[in-house]
Amino acid sequence: MESSESSGRAADHSLPVHGPAGIPVQTGIAHTISLCLLDLGIVITELELRSCLERHWGIADAHVSVHNGGMGSDTWFVEHEACQWVAKAVPASAGSQFKGGLGVAQWLKQAGISAGAPVPLPDGRLAASVGGDWLALLTWVPGRPLSSDSPADRELLGVTLARVHRALAGYRPERAQRFHWVDPQADHLSLRPWVRPAVAAAVDALDAAGLHQMTHGLLHTDPAPEAFRFDEATGRCGVIDWSYCIHGPLLYDLASAVMYVGGPGQAGELTEAYLRTGVLGRAEVGAGLALMLRFRWAVQADYFAWRISASVMTGIDELEENEKGLEDARRFLLP
C-alpha cells in the first residue's frame, strides 16, 4: 500500500463562483463532448468501495464518507490511520479520458506540483475496473482553496497556472483529446432560439482567429480558484481535479481563470502574474484573451443546454440550477 503524500481536498467542482458583473458561473463545465459520453450510471456501493480499497490498494477497514460534489463522477473521502485520500469513480464510457487525466496528475507530482496524483495499483495501473466503472485513489492535497475575492490569491492563481503549463510542456501522453469539442450543429443547441447562433458565432470567431497560431499545450480546462490549494504551512500551491488529458491553446486555461475570478476587470493581478512568467507573450494574450473568453462562455451555454435537454441532475439539487447556468451564459453572450 502507498500512503498519501499530503492531506487536503480533491473535488469535481460544482460550486458557483462569480463572473463579470457578478454573474455566477459554475465550475466543472469544461467539456460537453466529454460529459455527453457519460452514462452517469455509476453504481459502486460503499461496501464495494471498501472491498476494492483492500483488494487493490491494501487498505483494510478504511473510514469512507461520500463526497459527490462533482458533475461527472462519484467521489468519497477515505481515511485510514493517519492517512487520507479521495476515491473517484467514473463510468466506463469516460475511462480513457479519466486515465489520461490521472497520467497528467502523476506527471505534475513528479515535477513537484501537488495535483491529487493517483496511488498506483501494485501492477502500476492508475485505476481499477469495478463492475465496468473506473475507480482511482487520489492523494490528498493540503491547503485551502484560493479565493477570487483576494488580490493575493488571484496573483497566486496566475503564477501557479503558469507553473503548471510550463511543467506540462515536457509531458508527451500517448493520446490526448484535441481542442475544441463544441459542435454548433448539436441537437441540444436548439433548446432556446438564441443558443445556437450565439455558440456558432463564438466558435466561428475563434476559428477565424487561427488556432494554429496560438501557443498550445496540455490544459487543466477548469482552473477555478477552488481547484487551487494553498498550504500555508509550506507556502506551496497545488492544483487538483485533473479529469481529462486535453491538448489545446494555453489561452483557454487563462481565459477560464479570468472568467472564474470575475472577468478582465477583476483579473489584473492574475493576468499580470501569469504574463511575468513568460509562458505566453503579451501580444498573444492581448490579441486573443477577449476572443477566448467569449468562447469560454459559449462552452458554458453548450454545456448547460445539453444538461437541460438531457435532464441531467448530477452535482445539483434542482433543475433550475441548470437553467441558471444557461442564463448566466446568455447574459454574457447577448449583453
Image (cartoon, grey):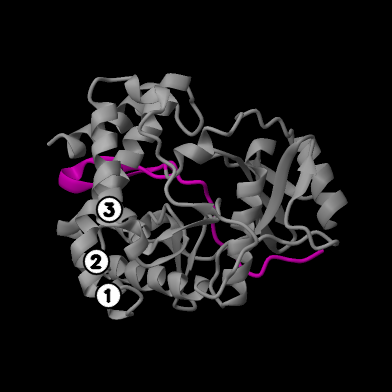
Spatial CA span between label 2 and label 3: 10 Å
Q: Is residue 3 magenta?
A: yes
Q: Main secondary structure of the magenta part?
A: loop
Q: Which residue is mark 3?
A: 292
- The three-letter amino acid code for the residue at tag 2 is Val
- The three-letter amino acid code for the residue at tag 1 is Gly
Is residue 210 in sight in this rendering?
A: yes
Q: Is residue 328 magenta?
A: no
Element type where label 2 sits in the image: helix
Spatial CA span between label 2 and label 1: 6 Å
Horizontal placement of 174 versus 294: left or right? right
- The three-letter amino acid code for the residue at tag 3 is Met
Q: Which residue is mark 2?
A: 285
Horizontal placement of 22 versus 79: left or right? left
Which residue sits at x=67%, y=32%? Answer: 42
Which residue sits at x=35%, y=25%? Answer: 189
Q: Is residue 257 above or below residue 268?
A: above
Q: Is residue 255 above or below residue 236?
A: above
Highlighted magenta segment, given as a residue range: 1-29
Element type where label 3 sits in the image: helix
- Please report whichever mark, 3 or 1, sits nearer to the chain's N-terminal start: 1
Give me the disc on residue 281. Answer: 1
Question: CB atoms at circles 2 and 1 under 8 Å apart?
Answer: yes
